[in-house]
Image (cartoon, rainbow, N blue to C red):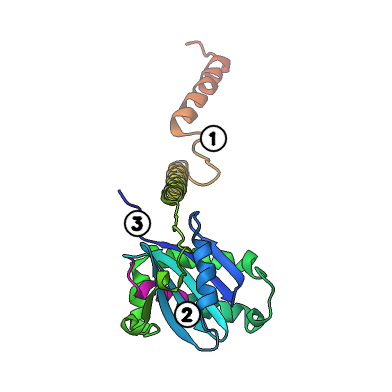
Amino acid sequence: MPPPSQIIYSLVARESTVLAEYTATSGNFIQVTGIILKRLNFNVNTKISYVYDKYVFHCIVDDKLVYLCMTDEDFPRRIPFAFLEDVKQRFKAAYGDRGKRALAYEMNEDFKKVLQKQAEYFATNPSADRISRVKGEIEEVKGIMMENIEKVLERGDKIELLVDKSATLNEQSFKFKKQSTALKNTMWWKNVKLWIVLIIIIILIIFFIAVAACGGFTFPKCAGGSPGPVNATLHAVPQQLSRLLLAPTQLPP
C-alpha cells in the first residue's frame, strides 16, 4: 500500500542560500532543489511548479525570497500553494526583512518547527484547503506554469530522484502510536478524576445523612450525650430499690 500524499520537503531561501528547511523523510531531492534555486529568477515575483519524475516542486518567489515545497505528483496543487502562502506570511511576520541579509540556516532552528507543523497540518487536515478557499488567499493554480525540470538539465546531468518511502511510513506510524498513547493516557486520567469525584460525593451524602440522624454536627444522639428514655428508666430502678430497703418497717398493733 503506497504512503499517503504529503508535503515531503520545504524550505525558505534567498537565491541559493537556504535560511530554513524541513523534510519528512530522507532522499537526494536536495540536489534537485539546488538546480531549481539556480534556475529561478528572483527579480520577479512569481509562482511556478517543476515536475520531476513522480514529484512536483512548487515555488513562490516574493521579494527576493523563495518559498518551496516538494510533494507527490498526485497531491492537489492548490494545497501546496496554500501551504507556501501561509509559510510566507509567517516568515515575514517573524523576521521581516532579515531574510534578505541573513546567513545560511540562520532561521533554521526556530522556523524549521513552523515548516514541520504547517506541512503536517496542510497535508492531513481537510479544513486547511477549505479555509484558504473561503478567505480567497490562494489564486487559482490553473494559470501557474508547470515546467519539466528534466528539460533544463543538460544531457548526462540526469539525477535519479530518490525518496525513502519506508522512512516516511515509519515516521507516520510512530506519530500515530504516540498520539494513540497520549489519547489513552488522557482518557485514563479523565476516568480517575470521575471516580474521585463520585467517591467524594458519596462520602458527603453519607456524612450529611449521619448528621441528620444523630441530631447535628456534634452527633449528640450517637455519641452518648443525653440518655434516652430507656436508659433513664434503667438508671432509676436501683435508686427506687434502695429507698424501699432503707425505709423503717412498721409492725401492726
* Amino acid identity at mark 1: Ala
Q: Are marks 2 and 3 in contact (CB under 8 Å)?
A: no
Q: Is residue 208 visible?
A: no
The numbered dot on residue 4 is 3
Q: Is residue 50 magenta?
A: no
The numbered dot on residue 60 is 2
Q: Is residue 13 left or right of residue 136?
A: right
Quick one: SS at disc 2?
strand
Q: Is residue 74 left or right of residue 210?
A: left
Residue 157 at x, y = what percent? 48, 64
Q: Is residue 105 left or right of residue 12?
A: right
Q: Earlier in the sequence, mark 1 or mark 3?
A: 3
Q: Earlier in the sequence, mark 1 or mark 2?
A: 2
Alpha carbon of mark 1 to alpha carbon of mark 2: how far? 84 Å
* Amino acid identity at mark 2: Ile
In this view, 188 is above or below 54? above
Q: Main secondary structure of the magenta part?
A: helix
Residue 165 at x, y = what percent? 41, 51
Foreground of the two, 94 or 182: 94
Alpha carbon of mark 1 to alpha carbon of mark 3: how far? 72 Å
Residue 198 at x, y = what percent? 42, 46
* Amino acid identity at mark 3: Pro
Q: Which residues are magenta?
A: 75-85
